[in-house]
Image: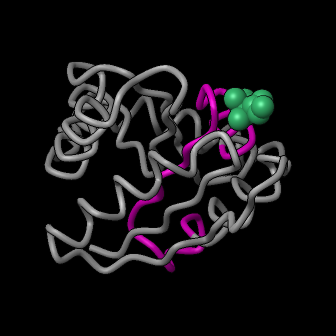
Amino acid sequence: MKIAIASDHGGTNLRAEIIGLLKELTLSYEDFGCECDSSVDYPDYALPLAKRVAKGEFDRGILICGTGIGMSIAANKVKGVRCALVHDVFSAKATRQHNDTNVLAMGERVIGPGLAIEIVRTWLDEEFEGGRHAGRIGKISAYEDQEA
Ligand code: RB5
């Protein structure tokens, strides 16, 4: 599994923790930054990552900002991206099983690294259940096609 990860200045510490986990799991990843001491704009990091996931260059993406909200809003503007803002393990599991999310957003100012690592482990492990959920995702894809 190939993973892309990025954060703004509000998520650099948690991004480093998650990269540590990816290394521990020996997963292939690319770090999209930011290399920032000062304030940057989260869409500048969310959109390039989301586009590369949508193109199929990465299987999954992980985005971190202060709240995770800006990153998730931006990523979900990219056709083919299903990004979930997750701060609990139950939702991490459900959003893979039901929504087949390909991008995960979290907020460094919202949760601690221990919980974030459990969320990422769960989200990477869980499979999409398909069935009735596939039909629902299909409706979102059809809407995206109609808008394009
Ligand atoms: C940056 O201050 C903050 O707004 C950003 O990290 C994020 O929380 C936006 O949604």
Q: Residue at x 30, y 21 (%)?
A: 91
How many circles with numbers are drawn on the protein? 0
Residue 17 location (% of width, % of height):
35, 53
Colour treatment of the image: one colour
For the residue pair 36 and 138, the one nearer the viewer reads as 36
Quarter of the picture holding the N terminus: bottom left
Residue 23 location (% of width, % of height):
24, 72
For the residue pair 35 and 59, the one nearer the viewer reads as 35
Q: Residue at x 61, y 71 (%)?
A: 32
Q: Residue at x 65, y 27 (%)?
A: 69
Residue 33 location (% of width, % of height):
64, 67
Asked whether residue 61 is in view, the answer is yes
Residue 59 shown in magenta: yes
Task: Spot the residue most to the front.
Answer: 37
User: Quarter containing ligand 1?
Assistant: top right
Asked whether residue 70 is in view, the answer is no
Where is 110 relative to 118, above or below? above
Q: Residue at x 59, y 74 (%)?
A: 55
Q: Quadrant of residue 22?
A: bottom left
Relative to 145, 121 lies left or right: left
Relative to 78, 86 lies left or right: left
Where is 61 relative to 87, above or below? below
For the residue pair 20 and 129, the one nearer the viewer reads as 20
Relative to 91, 129 lies left or right: left
Residue 110 shown in magenta: no
Q: Quadrant of residue 72?
A: top right
Relative to 114, 37 lies left or right: right
Q: Quadrant of residue 144?
A: top right
For the magenta stretch, what is the residue range? 53-75
